[in-house]
Image (cartoon, rainbow, N blue to C red):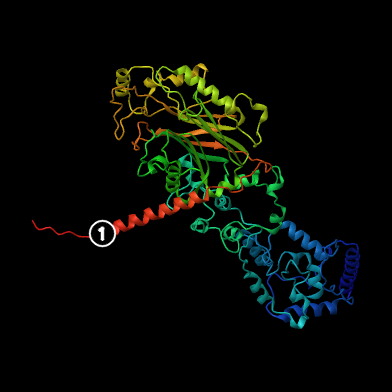
């Protein structure tokens, strides 16, 4: 009896201290020396009766009934002092991953193994069971794994008679499977920005031709036409980009109504969002802000007959890409100027329109532009100058065309200077008269008036191209020049250029101040016998010379890059060989305050050129059909 009374006293003291500590927020465990039948066995019980017996023995031993467990309640978002909250906080701190929460997506295989190890060590109980050991002793129920979102498990919330077998629960917990891994945030962007590629401007002139590129390593970033039917082929790997770009009826970039409301091109928005000539629109069509220009100059010798095919002049086989602008200057042009322009339109096809054409006697200057870029051009202005003493004779002089594209102003001049081997001074006078008398610009604003000079028209534009028959010769006799030509290696014309009059005058600063010329790697373009590659065999025996040239000038250094500078040797209808140059020009955004061209072009010329192109193609197909269907049998 004394031992039993001693045990009662210990239980009483331990129960009182436990209640006090529980009221004070301390741990639930009693003093360690206490040994009662309520201790959890080392091996899990197999039947529910094993849980009920300790509880019955406790009732016989102690007259004091343990405090019933608190009712389950949901944790609040705020601060809580419950045991469940403290256990849950410690559990979150010890492990950031949960095996029982399907909303978790960061669980790993290692954390699964660790938690399973704890389950085996504690006989099917999760770590929080140890913190509730006193509750399990008082109620005779083990504490099983709980979900992070609930304060008590579903099994604890049920009556004791309805609780499932602990062995079954341990088996169920041990078979927890991780949910499928789902992304915790937005997917990373693709390595290739497809949207930006599809919105770039295309320099495509045919479905089989690629865009204009200056270097071969840029082939991966080819610009594509927004109306190209093969656009979606390059976007198959990104359905999101495809869907975001599609409008209701095309693959063009969709336009929001608020953007339509906010855009006011003709009201003078300055470099702001929605400006027609602003940075946003420039980057959309020219992500690298680089424009391709093809310049050609040709003295036609006044011949009425034109070459049967101008593809060699405008679309040479050694050039893989078409350009954004085609500017053609002609000296001593054919009598029918309209026929010449129609032939140019027929050659370039439906992807180009004639922006402007000007003439001064037999001097012709024609500008073609890609049809989808015409909206970014200002109105075009032109002026002419004659260098003859009698102004009615318009065979020598110059014609200039000026306009603004986005925020960059352009000036193109084609001219024909005084002829004669020794008339260098007269040619310098022609140059000086042209730069002073060419009245441009007229209504277009100067993009940089602080760097302009009233006495020099070439200083009033950002980019200037001057080309034509300058008539500068080689300062050697015919025999010496031919000997130099025969001794020169392929593309090495240094020995010839040492005697070039124009190069010497530019070096001395007496002509073309501020202009540059690309290195010459082609044979002299003057003077040939018509129809062959033999230099002049007439009685005059003119010295072969570089009379046909293309020079350029830029307000800012390195804004113009030369891609190609050569002669066209396949066109032999004149005593001159055409000279062509391909250039890359740096563009800058502009202001909508300039007088916009608003898409003006020569519509009648466009339709006539396309009609001829179609007729020519039909005739070619008909000829091929007749040739393939005809058969001739001969008997020897």
Q: Please state which of residues 72 and 271 is positioned toward the viewer in this rendering.
A: 271
Residue depicted at 47% across the width and 51% down the height? 350
The location of residue 246, given as percent across then percent down, is 59, 60
Instruction: For residue 512, say whether it is visible.
Output: no
State left or right for residue 429 relative to residue 307: right
The location of residue 63, given as percent across then percent down, is 89, 77
State left or right for residue 543 relative to residue 448: left
Tell me if mark 1 has few (under 14), some (14-19) or many (20+) residues whose alpha carbon lies within 10 angstroms of its own: few
Residue depicted at 30% across the width and 26% down the height? 536
Q: In which quarter of the image is the C terminus?
A: bottom left
Instruction: For residue 404, say whether it is visible.
Output: yes
State left or right for residue 469 relative to residue 124: left
Q: Please state which of residues 90 and 375 is positioned toward the viewer in this rendering.
A: 375
Element assignment for label 1? helix
Q: Please state which of residues 282 and 568 is positioned toward the viewer in this rendering.
A: 568
Q: In which quarter of the image is residue 289?
A: top right
Residue depicted at 29% across the width and 59% down the height? 625
Q: Please state which of residues 472 and 538 is positioned toward the viewer in this rendering.
A: 538
Residue most toward the bottom? 161
Q: Quadrant of residue 124?
A: bottom right
The location of residue 151, given as percent across then percent down, is 78, 69
**Figure check: 262 above or below 484:** below
**Figure check: 581 above or below 342:** above
Residue most toward the left? 636
**Figure check: 358 above or below 182:** above
Where does label 1 land, which residue? 628
The location of residue 357, given as percent across then percent down, is 51, 40
Q: How many labels does the image show?
A: 1
């Amino acid at each position: 009896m004394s031992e039993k009374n001693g045990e009662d006293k210990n239980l009483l003291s331990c129960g009182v201290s436990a209640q006090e500590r529980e009221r004070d927020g301390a741990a639930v465990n009693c003093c360690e020396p206490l040994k009662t039948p309520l201790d959890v066995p080392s091996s899990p019980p197999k039947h529910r009766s094993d849980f009920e017996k300790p509880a019955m023995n406790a009732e016989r031993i102690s007259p004091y009934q343990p405090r019933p467990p608190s009712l389950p309640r949901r944790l609040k978002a705020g601060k809580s002092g419950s045991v469940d909250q403290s256990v849950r906080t410690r559990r979150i701190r010890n492990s950031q991953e949960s095996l029982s929460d399907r909303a978790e997506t960061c669980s790993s295989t290692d954390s699964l193994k660790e938690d399973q190890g704890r389950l085996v060590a504690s006989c099917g109980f999760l770590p929080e069971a140890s913190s509730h050991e006193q509750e399990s002793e008082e109620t005779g129920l083990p504490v099983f794994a709980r979900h992070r979102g609930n304060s008590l498990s579903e099994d604890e919330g049920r009556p004791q008679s309805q609780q499932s077998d602990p062995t079954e629960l341990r088996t169920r917990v041990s078979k927890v499977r991780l949910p499928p891994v789902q992304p915790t945030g937005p997917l990373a962007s693709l390595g290739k920005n497809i949207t930006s590629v599809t919105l770039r401007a295309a320099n495509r002139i045919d479905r089989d031709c690629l865009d204009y590129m200056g270097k071969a390593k840029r082939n991966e970033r080819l610009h594509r036409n927004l109306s190209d039917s093969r656009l979606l082929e390059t976007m198959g790997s990104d359905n999101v980009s495809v869907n975001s770009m599609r409008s209701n009826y095309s693959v063009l970039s969709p336009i929001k109504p608020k953007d339509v409301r906010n855009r006011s091109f003709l009201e003078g928005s300055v470099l702001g969002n929605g400006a027609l000539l602003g940075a946003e629109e420039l980057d959309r069509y020219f992500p690298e802000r680089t424009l391709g220009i093809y310049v050609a100059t040709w003295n036609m010798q006044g011949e009425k007959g034109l070459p049967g095919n101008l593809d060699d002049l405008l679309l040479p086989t050694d050039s893989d890409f078409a350009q954004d602008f085609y500017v053609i200057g002609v000296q001593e042009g054919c009598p029918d100027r309209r026929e010449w322009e129609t032939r140019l339109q027929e050659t370039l096809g439906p992807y180009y329109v004639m922006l402007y054409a000007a003439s001064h006697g037999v001097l012709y200057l024609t500008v073609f532009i890609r049809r989808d870029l015409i909206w970014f051009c200002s109105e075009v202005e032109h002026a002419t100058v004659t260098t003859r003493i009698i102004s009615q004779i318009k065979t020598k002089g110059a014609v200039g065309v000026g306009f603004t594209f986005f925020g960059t102003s352009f000036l193109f001049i084609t001219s024909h200077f005084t002829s004669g081997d020794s008339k260098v001074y007269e040619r310098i006078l022609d140059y000086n008269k042209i730069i002073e008398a060419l009245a441009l610009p007229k209504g277009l604003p100067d993009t940089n008036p602080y760097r302009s000079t009233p006495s020099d028209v070439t200083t009033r534009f950002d980019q200037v191209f001057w080309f034509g028959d300058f008539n500068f010769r080689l300062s050697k006799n015919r025999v010496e020049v031919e000997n130099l030509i025969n001794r020169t290696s392929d593309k090495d014309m240094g020995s010839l250029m040492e005697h070039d009059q124009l190069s010497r005058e530019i070096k001395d600063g007496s002509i073309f101040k501020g202009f540059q010329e690309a290195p010459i790697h082609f044979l002299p373009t003057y003077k040939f016998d018509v129809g062959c590659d033999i230099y002049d065999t007439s009685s005059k025996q003119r010295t072969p010379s570089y009379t046909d040239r293309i020079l350029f000038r830029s307000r800012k250094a390195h804004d113009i890059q030369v891609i190609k500078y050569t002669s066209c040797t396949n066109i032999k209808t004149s005593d001159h060989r055409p000279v062509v140059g391909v250039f890359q020009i740096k563009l800058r955004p502009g202001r909508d305050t300039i007088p916009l061209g608003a898409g003006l072009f020569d519509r009648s010329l466009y339709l006539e050129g396309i009609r001829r192109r179609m007729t020519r193609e039909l005739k070619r197909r008909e000829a091929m059909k007749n040739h393939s269907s005809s058969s001739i049998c001969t008997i020897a």
